[in-house]
């Protein structure tokens, strides 16, 4: 296990943004990933559910002041990120270490300078809620590194989706079903038919804020 108090400092600038500013930055990043061009102010306002482009204009101005964006003068689509969209590992919602519940797939933050914390670089980080993986050293509030994977070996700790809900458990594969095993005797295993189980990723490590 790694302690990531130093690495968490890399997200301090994001933490200084308001929730509306973070959401606007997320929309711009996603638009760039999908279309390779930034959104117009009208598109940004629509994605944010704003009634006019004035809200988008104010948010962009704030992000520009704080060093996240710049405006390229003389171009129709003027927004440009001051750092690459993949600058850091995204923290994506949360994963319950308990009974499965819905987890929204929304990028909350990005964590930078963590390459030396994991033997395998994770694709994303999930915040743990619950205590069912306590005896595996995974505690409530930890960030778990997850490498995207559609398959996993028996014995690995995985993020699994069952009936649209996700959970973090140790996987045990049987002939025609799977067991999702907690690491806490206060919790019961989940039995899932193989055709009803989706593996979202494999656990590769922990960051714990000390």
Image (cartoon, rainbow, N blue to C red):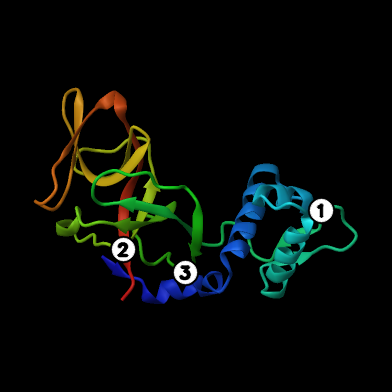
Residue at image point 44% right, 51% down: 123
Q: Which mark is residue 77?
A: 1
Q: Earlier in the sequence, mark 3 or mark 2?
A: 3
Residue 156 visible in this rendered orientation of the protein: no
Residue at image point 81% right, 58% down: 78
- Helix, strand or loop at label 1? It is loop
Residue at image point 67% right, 48% down: 47
In the rendered image, residue 122, in percent from the top left (x then y), is placed at 40, 54
Left or right of 33 in this view: 79: right
- Helix, strand or loop at label 3? It is loop
| 3 and 2 marks in contact (CB < 8 Å) | no
* Label 2: few (<14), some (14–19) or many (≥20) C-alpha neighbours in 10 Å: many
In the rendered image, residue 24, in percent from the top left (x then y), is placed at 64, 58
Q: Nearer the viewer, residue 115 or 70?
A: 70
The answer to which quarter of the image holds residue 18 is bottom right
Q: CA distance from mark 1 to mark 3?
A: 31 Å
Q: CA distance from mark 1 to mark 2?
A: 39 Å
> Is 55 rendered above or below residue 9?
above
Foreground: disc 3 or disc 2? 2
| 1 and 2 marks in contact (CB < 8 Å) | no
Q: Which mark is residue 142?
A: 2
In the image as oriented, which residue stretches furthest toward the front?
Answer: 51
């Amino acid at each position: 296990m790694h302690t990531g108090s130093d690495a968490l400092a890399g997200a301090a600038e994001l933490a200084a943004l308001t929730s509306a500013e973070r959401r606007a930055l997320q929309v711009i990043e996603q638009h760039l990933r999908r279309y390779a061009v930034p959104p117009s102010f009208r598109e940004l306002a629509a994605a944010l559910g704003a009634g006019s482009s004035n809200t988008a204009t104010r948010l962009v101005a704030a992000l520009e002041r704080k060093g996240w964006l710049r405006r390229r003068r003389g171009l129709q689509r003027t927004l440009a990120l001051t750092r690459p969209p993949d600058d850091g590992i995204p923290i994506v919602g949360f994963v319950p270490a308990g009974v499965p519940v819905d987890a929204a797939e929304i990028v909350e933050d990005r964590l930078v300078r963590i390459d030396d914390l994991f033997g395998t670089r994770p694709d994303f980080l999930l915040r743990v809620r619950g205590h069912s993986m306590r005896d595996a050293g995974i505690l409530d509030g930890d960030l778990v590194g997850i490498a995207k994977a559609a398959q996993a070996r028996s014995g690995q700790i995985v993020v699994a989706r069952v009936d649209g809900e996700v959970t973090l458990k140790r996987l045990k594969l049987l002939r025609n079903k799977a067991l999702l095993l907690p690491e806490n005797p206060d919790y019961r295993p989940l039995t899932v038919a193989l055709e009803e189980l989706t593996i979202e990723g494999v656990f590769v490590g922990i960051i714990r804020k000390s």
